Amino acid sequence: MNEVRVKGWNDLQNELFEDSWSPELGRFRSRYAYRGLSDANYRLETTLIRLQGPYRELERHLLRNFRKYAHRSVVQKDSVWHWLSVAQHYGLPTRLLDWTYSPLIALHFATANIEKFNIDGVIWAVNYVRVHQLLPKELRHALDREGANVFTVEMLSESIDSLEKLSGLSKEVIVILFEPPSIDDRIVNQFAFFSLMSDSASVMDDWLRTHPEVWRRIVIPAAIKWEIRDKLDQANITERVLFPGLDGLGSWLKRHYSPKALE
């Protein structure tokens, strides 16, 4: 079953850490990427798609001008994947989608907006090892050479030097998950990584539904969101930690002191 609706906190924890046992390692090491959404009906659309208009054609203009006006010191190397990572991090519409290795951080994002507490939330869990088994041979070999399950921007740069080359790798749409450079504490604290699709117009959930073996959806009933939120706060999974700085502190305090019964 790809979708499960949990009943409470304990049930939720069991589902979040389902399939995390690794027999070959003898350890609990999940191979899932997690993404939390405050509304279970939200799609896995990128910020580029949400820009609307002729966004497919606008992508190269957005990135070209970001590279032109940004300080050169913001990237480690002048590669498209470094630039896309930095651009996504600073709010430019891109074809990247944010994920985290941490199911609890995904749970934070599913419950951070208290104005959505009357709506069911959701956690998407995608097995990145199985996703990468679907890649063209060239990219699978790149992972095998490094003994890695997820790409870095350096590994991507060695195999794919442009968005045009990415789109020409396969007639089928492919999905790659990669770790961004540690630009700042926010990336590090959120245990973040990105998904990347070879077709900028593709929506991730459409692709996932054609590959049911790689994903799960955990629906969080609106009735238990307050309990989850309070327990995450006690566990220090908050904006103050995930968004270091005064803006994160302000967001945490605003939410923490908001009354439960909003007008």
Image (spheres, rainbow, N blue to C red):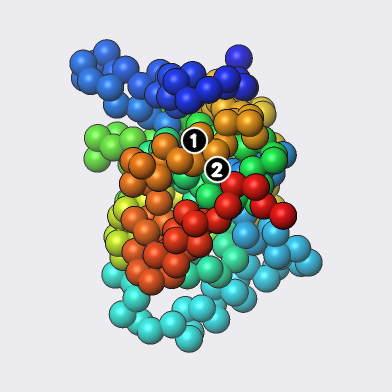
Residue 60, above or below 235: below
Q: Can you tell which quarter of the image residue 105 is in?
A: top left
Expressed as whole percent of the image width and height from the top left, the position of residue 82 reads 39, 65
The amino acid type, in three-letter code, at marker 2 is: Ala
Quadrant (top left, top right, bottom left, bottom right) of the C terminus: bottom right
- Between label 1 and label 2, give the one nearer the viewer: 1
Sequence-earlier tag: 1 or 2 = 2
Most foreground residue, 69 or 45: 45
Which disc, if any, is residue 88?
none
- Of the residues shown, which amino acid type is indicated by label 1? Ile
Q: What residue is disc 1 on?
A: 228
Label 1 crowd bin: few (<14), some (14–19), many (20+), radius 10 Å:
some
Query: At 33% across and 35% down in the image, what residue appears?
Result: 149
* Position in image of residue 115 (x %, y %): 65, 51
Q: Which residue is mark 2?
A: 110
Q: CA distance from mark 1 to mark 2?
A: 10 Å
* Camera sees residue 44: no
Residue that extends furthest to the right in the rendered view of this protein: 53
Instruction: Please tell me whether mark 2 sits on a helix, a strand or a loop.
Output: helix
Which residue is pictured at 42% across the width and 31% down the height?
Answer: 32
Residue 257 placement (x, y as % from top left): 49, 57
User: Residue at position x 62%, y 76% from top?
Assistant: 61
Relative vertical location of residue 11 with respect to residue 138 in this rendering, above or below: above
C-beta proximity under 8 Å, tags 1 and 2: yes
Q: Let me know if residue 234 appears in the view.
A: yes
Q: Nearer the viewer, residue 150 or 2?
A: 2
Q: Is residue 238 above or below residue 253?
A: above
